[in-house]
């Protein structure tokens, strides 16, 4: 890596750190105004943004990217409207910065507390999805953080246009425009240069495939919050209502299969399997879902098409209309399967048994655990956080969908009246 290249990234880091300090001192109103201005520009620049996005889509199609990847890349009217709505929703959320979460008094009369403060400068390395550019920048600004973005090469033109829009919005407000910066190159060496900026970047968040996350984790000099695989399970318990279980399974798998909260494996208690498997199998086949099943499931499918599952299928994040299916002997075997094959992302149980539901919530330690709801709700927006910066499968410092509070840390504040330690 050339000295000139290193000097460029050192300047980028310095400007991000300077912007973060200024941003942290701004009040809620100034940060909210920046988000609302960006939302307004999104509403009025859709045609231009879609032109740039089309350049990426054409190039991605020529490269043979999968339909799931193209779906993540596409900025249609609905996606752009949702991005603007997400910015407005984040602006309307309570500001976590400066909130004192706890106060207590020591025997010597000192009052001790914890106050939320920004993390500082957040680096994000991500693939394909240009909406991450808006979500990440919006959440970081609201929480008082500067952000350095490095999107994937497949979304280069889309990301460049979105960051230019964001910086234009910041220029109209008191938020320094360098609070949002883009690594404006597709050169892979740029990622390595970014991962060495531990003097300036406080935490790194990778979003993308397993290869990207491993690369970032191995080379980053700063702490990394991993958004790892989404091997999500739906477990249909012996006491499940069949119609509900069918709806939740089909929604979890087929509603949008190319995202991390889609169901990848269906587990079925043996007591309900004879009645449930033929019904859910037909419903899934009608949605063009390929079934990769255990031998017990195969015997119950009748004339419906299937493939026998390999052990690797139960580890797989298909991100496509493919579903691994297994009949289990018991609740305990379902939980053991999740522990062995899961990725600590999202699991749901379908059951009418209150006691079994409570056991599942206690026994399963994934970031999101649902009862009688689709895995597709594992999303910051759906859970009331506004937009999200990712779904962390790392238990330190955050776990699950990361909203505003997860983009802050807490410092100690102490109020005394002359106490000296003896």
Image (tube, helix red, strand yellow):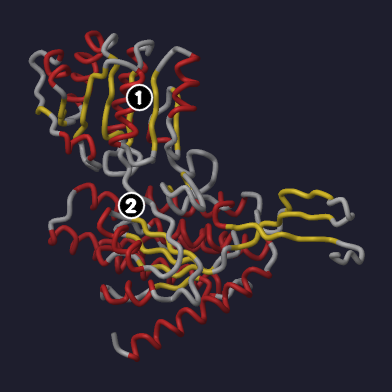
Residue plotted at (40% across, 82% down): 9
**Depth order, front residue of 35/101:** 101
Q: CA distance from mark 1 to mark 2?
A: 27 Å
Provide the secondary structure element on which disc 1 rests. helix
Residue plotted at (27% across, 35% down): 264
Q: Is residue 381 left or right of residue 335?
A: right
Residue tagged 1: 248
Residue plotted at (57% across, 76% down): 19
Residue 322 in the image: state x and y as whole percent: 19, 35
Q: Residues within 10 Å of mark 2 (few under 14, many from 20)?
A: some
Asked which quadrant contains residue 236, the reply is top left
Q: Is residue 94 left or right of residue 232?
A: right
Provide the secondary structure element on which disc 2 rests. loop
Q: Which mark is residue 76?
A: 2
Residue 346 in the image: state x and y as whole percent: 39, 36
Residue plotted at (35% across, 21% down): 332
Please identify the quadrant where the N terminus is shown.
bottom left
């Amino acid at each position: 890596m050339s000295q000139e290249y290193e000097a460029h990234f050192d300047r980028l880091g310095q400007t991000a750190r300077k912007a973060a300090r200024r941003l942290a001192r701004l009040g809620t109103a100034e940060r909210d105004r920046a988000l609302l201005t960006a939302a307004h520009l999104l509403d009025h620049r859709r045609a231009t943004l879609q032109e740039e996005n089309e350049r990426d889509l054409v190039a991605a199609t020529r490269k043979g990217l999968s339909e799931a990847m193209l779906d993540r890349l596409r900025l249609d009217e609905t996606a752009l409207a949702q991005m603007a709505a997400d910015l407005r929703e984040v602006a309307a959320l309570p500001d976590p910065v400066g909130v004192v979460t706890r106060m207590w008094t020591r025997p010597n009369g000192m009052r001790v507390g914890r106050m939320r403060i920004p993390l500082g400068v957040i680096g994000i390395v991500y693939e394909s999805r240009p909406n991450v550019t808006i979500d990440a920048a919006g959440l970081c600004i609201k929480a008082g953080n500067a952000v350095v973005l490095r999107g994937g090469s497949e979304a280069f033109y889309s990301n460049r246009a979105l960051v230019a829009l964001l910086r234009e919005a910041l220029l109209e407000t008191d938020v320094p425009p360098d609070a949002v910066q883009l690594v404006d190159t597709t050169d892979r060496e740029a990622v390595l240069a970014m991962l060495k900026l531990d003097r300036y970047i406080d935490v790194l968040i990778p979003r993308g495939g397993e290869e990207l996350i491993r690369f970032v984790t191995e080379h980053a000099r700063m702490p990394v919050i991993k958004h790892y695989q989404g091997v999500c399970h739906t477990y249909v318990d012996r006491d499940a209502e069949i119609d509900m279980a069918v709806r939740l399974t089909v929604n979890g798998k087929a509603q949008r299969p190319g995202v991390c909260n889609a169901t990848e494996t269906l587990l079925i208690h043996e007591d309900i399997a004879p009645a449930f498997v033929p019904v859910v199998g037909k419903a899934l086949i009608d949605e063009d879902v390929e079934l990769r099943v255990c031998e017990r499931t195969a015997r119950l499918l009748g004339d419906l098409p299937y493939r026998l599952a390999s052990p690797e299928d139960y580890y797989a994040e298909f991100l496509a209309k493919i579903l691994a299916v297994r009949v289990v002997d018991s609740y305990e075997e379902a939980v053991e399967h999740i522990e062995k094959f899961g990725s600590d992302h999202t699991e749901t149980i379908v059951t009418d048994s209150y006691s079994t539901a409570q056991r599942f919530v206690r026994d399963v330690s994934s970031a999101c655990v649902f009862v009688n709801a689709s895995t597709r709700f594992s999303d910051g927006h759906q859970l009331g956080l506004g937009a999200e910066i990712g779904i962390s499968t790392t238990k330190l410092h955050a776990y699950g969908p990361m909203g505003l509070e997860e983009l802050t840390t807490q410092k100690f504040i102490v109020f005394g009246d002359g106490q000296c330690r003896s």
